[in-house]
Structure formats: structure tokens, C-alpha cells
Image (cartoon, grey):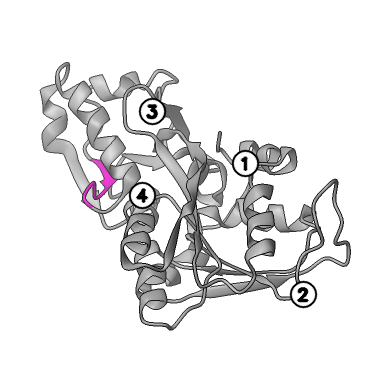
């Protein structure tokens, strides 16, 4: 399993924004047009870090400036004119909807570009490939991101409802975390033996290098989609659209698969 990182993003939860700028001298790839000189400003959630950092290594259409922060932080910064974005990448559908409703998001530049699978993770070897551990009374607590604020948490709550039918005791073992990173921290630190996480976090984190996990069928819960949305006030529309289209390229799809996306 690829070694990723975790603690770099604990600061993001507390309010930090980390930016990365990269460029490539090659501006022609396949049949794409030459992009503008200005960097495309990409605003993305931290969960996409490993994917985007690999993508930038092969992206040769121009310059990109990436800022990572939570969806809520990006939204507040954009609405208050503290952050400029050409395109937003996130996994919570309500934020593109808010941008569009507020008049800054482009409804014609919005869509889903990938998704990931819901996983059950433990630092122990307790989890079998079929997730049957949920039917057994061999764990004390199971943690999930709060379903009210996290897409993966809502998906996890749907799985719990299915398993409660077989094992009603599960309901009393479920606890909630503020977000996916705090859920992972709780599992690693032994506060909960089991936890629900998006599969991309299991693939891309050094904290999950050891342990066990299983994956749930995406027919059992609402999909954990990742969305793009372009902004109306972008001064770099052609370059932004080229970057958006690149998300669907063969190179991008290979990188997405490597990092636990579909």
C-alpha cells in the first residue's frame, strides 16, 4: 500500500491553507490548444492531495496554482473575496450548489469526475475481506465522520443501518468524529477499533500501511463522488476548461485508479 501522509493536513482542519504552484515548459499535448500564461487557480479539498500532486507531474498544458482547504473554508474565503478560484474540486455536492445559487458558480461547468469506495479500516488484523466483522461482538467502538457534514459519514450511516438488522448491538458502538482525518486519528490512536473511511485515504496514508480493511459494494450506499465546478469570474476560462477536460484524460484516470478512485 502506497505511503501517503496524514499529519500535514491536521493543520488544514484548524484553518490553514496550503498552496502549491507548478508549471511545465511543454504547452502542447495531443490536440489541446495552447493555454494562457496565467496559472489556473485550483481550489481543492485535502483528500485530493496525493492524486493532484501526481497529476501535476504529468500535466504539460501550462501552469497551475493549487490551494488545499476544507470545502467550507474555501467557500467562506471565496464568498468573502479572500480567495480566487478558477475551478473547485470537492466531494460534497452542496458546495457547488451554493456557489451556483450565490451567482459565482457556473452551472454549465459543473459535474462529477470520479468517485471512491467506502472502506472499513482497523490498525489490527481483525477485518476480513467481506466485512463480516461487523456481525461479531469482538470490537468496542466503531467511528465514522459525522454524517451531517461528511459524505463518507452519510454513506457509513447507510451501511450501519443494513448491519443493525443482523447485529442490533452495533448501534450502541457507533461514535462520530468531526471529519475523516479525525476519524483516522481516533483509529490509529486506539480510541476506536474500527472506522469508516473513503478508500482513497486508506491507499494514500502511511498510518494505514499496516492493519486490515474491507470495501463495501457501492450499491449499498450513496456514492462518494468528487465534483468539479468552474467559476463565472474566471479570467482564464480557456485554460481552466483545458484543465477540467484533463481530469478525464487517460493519464488522469490511471492516476485516479492508483490512488483508490474509480
Which residue appears at 70% of the width and 53% of the height?
55
Give the Cα separation between the discs numbered 2 and 3: 53 Å
Question: Which residue is depicted at the point 59% across and 52% down?
Answer: 4
Q: Secondary structure at mark 2?
A: loop
Disc 4 is placed on an element classified as loop
The part of the image, by quadrant, that contains residue 33 is bottom right
Q: Which residues are magenta?
A: 142-148
At x 41%, y 68%, the residue is 104
Left or right, 158 with respect to 197, comes to left
Percent position of residue 118, x then y? 40, 34
Which quadrant is home to the N terminus? top right
Q: Secondary structure at mark 3?
A: loop
Front of the two marks 3 and 1: 1
Q: Is tag 1's residue or tag 4's residue first in the polypeptide sequence? A: 4
Quarter of the image for residue 71 reads: bottom left
State the separation of the CA atoms marked 3 and 1: 28 Å
Q: Confirm or deny contact between disc 1 and disc 2 (CB under 8 A).
A: no
The residue indicated by pointer 4 is: 93
- Whether the residues at callouts 4 and 3 have beta carbons within 8 Å, the answer is no
Tell me, yes or no, whether the highlighted magenta stretch contains residue 169: no
Q: Position of residue 254 (x, y in %)?
A: 70, 37
Quickly name the residue at label 3: 126
State which quarter of the image contains the C terminus: top right
Residue in the picture at 24% in, 19% down: 135
Q: CA distance from mark 4 to mark 3?
A: 34 Å
- Decide which of tag 4 and tag 2 comes sooner along the chain: 2
Amino acid at each position: 500500500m502506497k505511503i501517503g501522509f496524514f499529519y500535514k493536513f491536521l493543520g488544514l482542519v484548524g484553518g490553514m491553507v496550503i498552496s502549491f504552484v507548478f508549471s511545465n515548459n511543454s504547452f502542447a499535448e495531443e490536440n489541446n490548444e495552447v493555454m494562457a500564461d496565467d496559472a489556473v487557480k485550483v481550489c481543492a479539498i485535502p483528500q485530493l492531495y496525493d492524486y493532484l500532486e501526481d497529476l501535476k507531474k504529468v500535466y504539460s498544458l501550462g501552469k497551475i496554482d493549487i490551494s488545499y482547504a476544507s470545502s467550507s473554508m474555501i467557500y467562506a474565503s471565496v464568498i468573502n473575496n479572500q480567495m480566487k478560484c478558477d475551478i473547485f474540486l470537492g466531494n460534497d455536492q452542496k458546495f457547488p450548489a451554493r456557489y451556483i445559487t450565490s451567482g459565482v458558480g457556473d452551472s454549465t461547468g459543473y459535474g462529477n469526475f470520479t468517485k471512491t469506495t467506502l472502506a472499513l479500516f482497523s490498525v489490527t488484523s481483525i477485518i476480513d475481506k467481506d466485512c463480516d466483522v461487523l456481525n461479531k461482538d469482538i470490537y468496542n467502538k466503531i467511528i465514522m465522520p459525522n454524517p451531517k457534514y461528511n459524505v463518507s459519514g452519510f454513506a457509513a450511516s447507510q451501511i450501519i443501518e443494513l448491519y443493525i438488522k443482523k447485529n442490533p448491538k452495533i448501534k450502541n458502538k457507533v461514535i462520530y468524529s468531526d471529519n475523516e482525518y479525525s476519524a483516522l486519528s481516533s483509529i490509529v490512536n486506539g480510541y476506536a477499533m474500527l472506522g469508516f473511511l473513503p478508500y482513497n485515504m486508506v491507499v494514500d496514508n502511511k498510518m494505514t500501511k499496516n492493519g486490515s480493511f474491507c470495501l463495501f459494494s457501492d450499491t449499498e450506499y450513496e456514492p462518494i463522488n468528487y465534483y468539479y465546478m468552474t467559476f463565472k469570474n474566471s479570467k482564464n476560462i480557456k485554460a481552466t476548461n483545458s484543465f477540467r477536460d484533463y481530469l478525464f484524460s487517460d493519464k488522469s484516470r490511471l492516476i485516479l485508479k492508483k490512488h483508490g478512485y474509480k
